Image: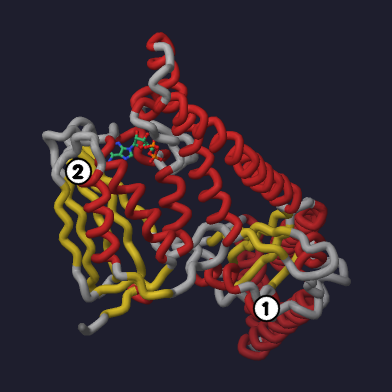
Amino acid sequence: MSRPAIRHVVGIIAALLVAAGIGLLAGRVAVSLTLALAVLLAFEVRNLLRFERWLRHKDAESPPDITGLWGEVVASTSRLHRRKLFHEQRVTALLREFRRMASAIPDGVVLLTRAREISWVNAAAGRWLGLNRKGDRGMRVDNIVRHPVVIAYLEDPDGHPPPRVQMPGQDERWLEFHLVRNPLGEQQLLLVRDVTSEARVDAMRKDFVANASHELRSPLTVIGGYLDAMEDDATLDTVWREPVAEMRRQSDRMRGIVEDLLELSRLEARGGPAEKSPVDVAGLLAALRKEVLAQPEPAPPIEVGAQPDAFLLGSETELHSIASNLVWNAVKYTPPSGSIVVRWWADARGGHLSVKDTGIGIPAEHLPRLTERFYRVDAGRSRKLGGSGLGLSIVKHALQRHDAWLEVESIDGKGSNFTCHFPAARISRVTH
Ligand code: ADP
């Protein structure tokens, strides 16, 4: 017990003893004790009422001036209350400061509930997404940003890359969306970044590459034509035979690079998902096999096992480009003593095209970067084999347009397996 509490109890006992003594002297102990208890009770009730009144108005009134144990209770309560007020003010100030900062940051910030309803919006997000900072509170963000790519991303952020979309409106800004989720909390954060200038530079780069490749095509054709004629010319000095042959190889290589760059530009320019024409993959693979067998260079045996009734709904030229790049890579990077197996099959998950070889394989550290433009594991070897370093980049882009993805498995020195996975929505069963 605290000292004021002991004093309080001792005071009560003393008052009762005095009352009892007076009662004994007056011969009325019961009356005297009852009176003393009534006075003590009145004292306690009065303090209790003052305390309770102050509790109700503690924000406006200063604490009552009470001494003893009641004074101690009032002081402790007042101290706790002051501390709570202090913390509340600090948290409010911090929150205000945070909102002021978040409002001022140049990126857009939208605070969402788990159900994707808007709780708060900063100035940039309000401006870019056309959100009314007060009026749209509680609205679902996907009812406001109605872009299908953004909606698909919000529904499954792990399954989609952060989308970049051009917003309709006067300034036609490009915005990139990032959803930051809090697995424990109720809130999630939608970050919006203005990528207009990046998108413009990207578009300029694509235009430049497309135009430059296009312009290079005609001179290369002319040079190739003259080199053809020189090679066929029986009167050509033998000293020039080897240099002309080398020039021919190099001009063919350059033509290959230009064609690949143009194809990549075309794929990028098309954007969006590919058309859905039924493509006979088994027929396409059989034709590719014939092409490989018809070439003069020694090549490894190639086996094709394809499900003939599974047609792929897509663009025939792009699917040909995918299969041809993968098959010719397998031919390039597999010695004639090795083997190549090409398979096409459909199951409940979709369609799968795999090209497996027993070639040189790829060291694991290169696998994540294989589909980058001009990325080669061994630049010297690839160049010698006539590779542009763009083949797998074309494959990746064409697959993306078919909502498909590429899986690469490879063991250095043992061989590689490239598998394209197409969604079930792009498979059509045909009955012959
Ligand atoms: P390239 O025109 O150089 O073949 P690609 O983009 O088609 O360019 O392939 C990129 C790189 O991936 C190649 O340079 C090669 O190192 C590696 N690669 C691709 N396919 C295979 C394969 N089947 N076996 C081994 N390495 C491969």
Q: Is residue 35 left or right of residue 285?
A: right
Q: Position of residue 326 (x, y in %)?
A: 32, 48
Mark 1 residue crowding within 10 angstroms, few (<14) / some (14–19) / many (20+):
many
Q: Name the amino acid, label 2.
A: Asp
Question: In the picture, which quadrant includes the C terminus?
Answer: bottom left
Q: Name the residue: 80% across, 57% down.
A: 103
Q: Where ligand 1 lies, by image quadrant?
A: top left
Dot placed on the residue nearer the N-terminal end, 1 or 2 = 1
Q: Position of residue 289 (x, y in %)?
A: 22, 52
Answer yes or no: disc 2 within 8 Å of ligand 1: yes
Task: Determine if residue 86 is in view.
Answer: no
- Give the structural element (helix, strand or loop) at label 1: helix
How was the colour assigned to the protein in this rendering?
A: secondary structure
* Badge 1 vs badge 2, beta-carbon distance below 8 Å: no
Q: Name the residue: 32% across, 52% down.
A: 407
Q: Name the residue: 46% across, 24% down.
A: 230
Taking depth in this image into account, of 52 and 27 the one nearest to the observer is 52
Q: Name the amino acid, label 1.
A: Ala
Q: Name the residue: 28% across, 32% down.
A: 363
Taking depth in this image into account, of 226 and 111 the one nearest to the observer is 226
Q: Position of residue 290 (x, y in %)?
A: 22, 53
Taking depth in this image into account, of 89 and 301 the one nearest to the observer is 301
Task: Determine if residue 148 is in view.
Answer: yes
Residue pointed to by mark 1 = 19
Taking depth in this image into account, of 165 and 35 the one nearest to the observer is 165
Q: Is residue 15 left or right of residue 67?
A: left
User: Which of the 4 image quarters holds residue 150?
Assistant: bottom right
Q: Which mark is residue 357?
A: 2
